Amino acid sequence: MSSTSRRPDSVLLDTHAVAGIQRSSTTACGSTRNGKTIEVSFFAENPPCPSKLFVHSPDMSPTVPPTIVCTEDDLLLLRVDMGRERLPISPRHCDYFIYRASAPSLEMLQRPHPFFHDCDVGVLPRPDGHYSVAALVATSSPGLYNLHLFHSDVSSWSSRSVSVGAPQREFPVEIPPDSCRLHHHFTSNVIAIGGERGTMGWVDLWRGILFCDVLDESSSLRGVPLPLPWKELSYNNGNGVRFGSPVQHRGIAFIRDKGCLKFVHLEISDVRLPGNDPETGAPSFRSDNWVLTTWSNAKMTDSFEDWDKDYTVQASDIPIDSTRISQALDNGPLHRSQDNGLVAEQLALHNLSMSQPAPCVNGKDVVYLVARKKFMHLKAWILAVDMVKGELQDVVEFGTRRQFGPSVIYRPSRISRFMNLVKKYTNPPTYYPR
């Protein structure tokens, strides 16, 4: 860590790794497909400050940053583009590595690997010390999927077909025509429950979860619903809305210490303004308010009633009593810009463009989310909201990152719990420009 060797209970990981070297007690080395060295180190910060992964290899692409796909306990799945080309990324150029934090090591997953998107794949720590990587990929047949598995003890991929044996329960209301997307499952992220059978869940944050016991070769998929987006379904005189990427509005985590799911929904009240914003080039919106609601679920059956509503916090009701937080807001996302001698209108907290809510993974009733001055603005801040007290716990600058539909700029993780951070960094990091 930058100022202390104390280990954070959880971290917020920047999904884009830094191309550079930062050697410490977290450093691990491995080999690329070409036999070249690849080096990974972890730079931990207390949330909501973003933590960084440093990656360096002469083989990696100079233009495409390595991506943190997912983490679970002390394991991190890293995608590294080994091509020499700019975007778009070609799957044949990507190698996948497992970084283990408890005793730092780095292992490249066997090639050739099956094709999957980042949102399709998760990692499962196993009680025997090994791990499994699982990707669930939809086929052209409804309800039928290909399950691709990599087991570290045999270091090879296998594949099998799995079907939905226990479909998700029917919705308690008729889904309006413009929201018919809810009738189909599109995975947005993966969660690992664990246990003897290795239960994992492929989450469609708008619809529900497909659970699978990946270590049981005879298992099928079972559906568990998520809380419905009631307000969005009532839009347009009851015709609903065409749902976009759910990760900008919803988040989920399995809280291992409590054995339950935590779910958060971000409801935004905004108005589409004429034309595009001259600064961002994106559609222009006026944000009037935003609301966070959290639920928990310890049963994980096919019943909507399993979800217990915990807290609701409305942005316009959040007091800003802390001088430190008030100054951070005024100097950050609420700072009034001046253009051609004209001072922009003063924003309030509830006027910010919000996205990517995520529950705190250590079980605290805290929600993190991304704040921008306006929709698609490049500069982002991370806010931490105390759902119990209805207060803003902290705000920090994240940096500059483009907002793109299905992608997220950070991932909450418990990986720091397993790290040996007794050694402080002795040398400043070395950065390699892209």
Image (cartoon, rainbow, N blue to C red):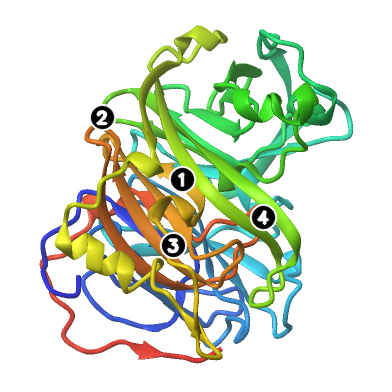
Query: What number of labels is visible?
Result: 4
Check disc 1 and report the residue beneath it: 357
Which residue is located at x 70 percent, y 50 percent?
116
Q: CA distance from mark 4 to mark 1?
A: 14 Å
Q: Nearer the viewer, residue 397 or 145?
A: 397
Q: Nearer the viewer, residue 65 or 393?
A: 393
Which residue is located at x 46 percent, y 45 percent?
357
Q: CA distance from mark 2 to mark 3?
A: 39 Å
Check disc 3 and report the residue beneath it: 347
Check disc 4 and report the residue beneath it: 405
Can residue 152 be seen from the camera position used here? no
Residue 261 versus residue 252 in the image, above or below: above
Looking at the image, tell me whether mark 2 or mark 4 is earlier in sequence order.
2
Judged from the image, the secondary structure of the residue bearing numbered disc 1 is strand
Looking at the image, tell me whether mark 1 or mark 3 is earlier in sequence order.
3
Residue 305 versus residue 45 in the image, above or below: above
Quick check: marks 1 and 3 in contact, CB under 8 Å?
no
The image quadrant that residue 261 belongs to is top left
Numbered disc in front, either 2 or 3? 3
Q: Is residue 2 left or right of residue 179?
A: left
Q: Few, some or many C-alpha atoms within 10 Å of disc 3 (few <14, some 14-19, many ≥20)?
A: some
Looking at the image, tell me whether mark 2 or mark 3 is earlier in sequence order.
2
Judged from the image, the secondary structure of the residue bearing numbered disc 3 is loop
Judged from the image, the secondary structure of the residue bearing numbered disc 2 is loop
Q: CA distance from mark 3 to mark 4?
A: 25 Å
Numbered disc in front, either 2 or 4? 4
Q: Few, some or many C-alpha atoms within 10 Å of disc 4 (few <14, some 14-19, many ≥20)?
A: few
Quick check: marks 2 and 3 in contact, CB under 8 Å?
no
The image quadrant that residue 231 belongs to is top right
